Amino acid sequence: MIIREYYSCDAAGQAHWREAIAKSDWNAGQKLHELLSTDTLRTKEWIGADARLYLLTEDDQLCAFCTLAANDDVPDTDLTPWIGFVYTFPAWRGQHLSGTLLAHAIEQARTDGHTAVYISTGHSGLYEKYGAAFLEHNKDLWGGNTRVYRLDFGWMQADGNERESGLPCREKAERILEVSHLLNPGPWREHSYCVARAAERIANACGDIDPEQAYLCGLLHDIGRRFGKGHLRHAYDGWQFMEHLGFPGIARICLTHSFKTQTLDDYIGNHDLTGKEEGALKEALAACHYDDLDLLIQLCDSICGTQVMNIEERMLDVKRRYGGYYPQDKWNANLEILRTFEARAGGDIYQIAGNGA
Ligand SMILES: [Fe+2]
């Protein structure tokens, strides 16, 4: 799936997506279609000149959409920016696509310098699921009642101490994982805790790796999953997200954890990045010199599902899930890392990693 921005598409693309929006079974979707057709959405009477309309697409199909704009349907307010027109087509519901769009819009708002976004809705109990908090009752453009929600994200940014270390404090790291999991729920939250605890314990046993650093890197290695279901994309998104927040120590782990042999060639899964993104990932990866933390998180990722498990069982599971493909070099590299850490930690790695679980 690809997220496109309507106003960045060419005229033919805009016409195609506009007609797709017309097929939504929602009044506001019909209104959006009308505003796009008359080119009046990006006006101060509606949602403002800098409005962006995000389209979550698969090939030429439109799966879901939302706007990020200075205004929404609440007049005379200083609150800004707003996420609005959030809609998923019936065939695509139940896959948390709204969360994927919200994560994307939030990231854009953060890049624009905001610390929160606002949402106007008639729903009660919906946006709470994505981590938004009810702010106030208000009136919409037509005089009807609306509920205004605020979704804060300014707190995620690295503070002075964190900028110095390149790592978040534990409390913030856990909070980032929790709110990210709300946007894309799945077993990756439990997996992340499993990797974090295993990494902390093995670091302790080794004696010369910082256990706290190991925990934090393990906890956030898959944070790119915040942005939805992705393969190669989850490494790229996590890397970029952590860099932008001011946590290069974690960004590096997001980048390196999937590449045992330090190349994209043996990646198991889809190459779901644009050419430019994949080029940037390749270049950054090639510039790394793997250190203890890179290798430790690779190891823990290989022995953790949602619980510590046998490395060969985990590799077989991955192999099964990806149509029987698992490069031998990568398989061997995993076993080699396990043997190295077993020697350093001075004991059975599964016992050390799972101790206390
Ligand atoms: Fe992982």
Image (cartoon, rainbow, N blue to C red):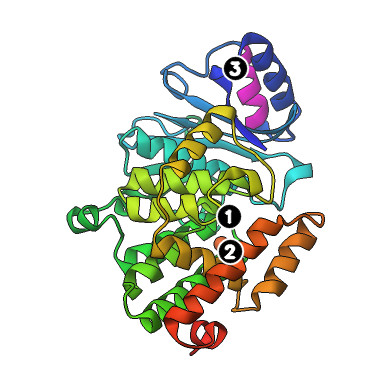
Q: Which residue does the numbered mark 2 point to in the structure image?
A: 188
* Mark 3 Cβ inside 8 Å of ligand 1: no
Relative to 80, residue 323 above or below: below
The picture quadrant where one finds residue 330 is bottom right
Which label number is shown at residue 184?
1
* Classed neighbour count for the residue bearing mark 3: other residues with Cα under 10 Å, few (<14), some (14–19), many (≥20): few
Q: In this orientation, does residue 259 appear?
A: yes
> Dot 3 corresponds to which residue?
9
Task: Decide: few, some or many residues near mark 1? Use Cα within 10 Å; few <14, some 14-19, many ≥20.
Answer: many
- Where on the image, by quarter, is ligand 1? bottom right
Q: Nearer the viewer, residue 101 or 279?
A: 279
Whether residue 304 appears in this view of the structure is: no
Q: Are marks 1 and 2 in contact (CB under 8 Å)?
A: yes
Q: Going 40% across and 67% down the picture, which residue do you hit?
A: 174
Q: Amino acid at mark 1?
A: Asn
Q: Element type at marker 3? A: loop
Determine whether the beta carbon of the residue marked 2 sits less than 8 angstroms from the nearest atom of ligand 1: yes
Mark 1–mark 2 distance (CA, rounded to whole Å): 9 Å
Evaluate if marks 3 and 1 touch, with contact meaning CB atoms under 8 Å apart.
no
Residue 348: quadrant of the picture: bottom right
Report the magenta residues as a range: 28-37
- Where residue 197 sits in the image (x, y, percent)? 46, 77
Q: In the rendered structure, which disc, 3 or 1, sits on the residue that comes first in sequence? A: 3
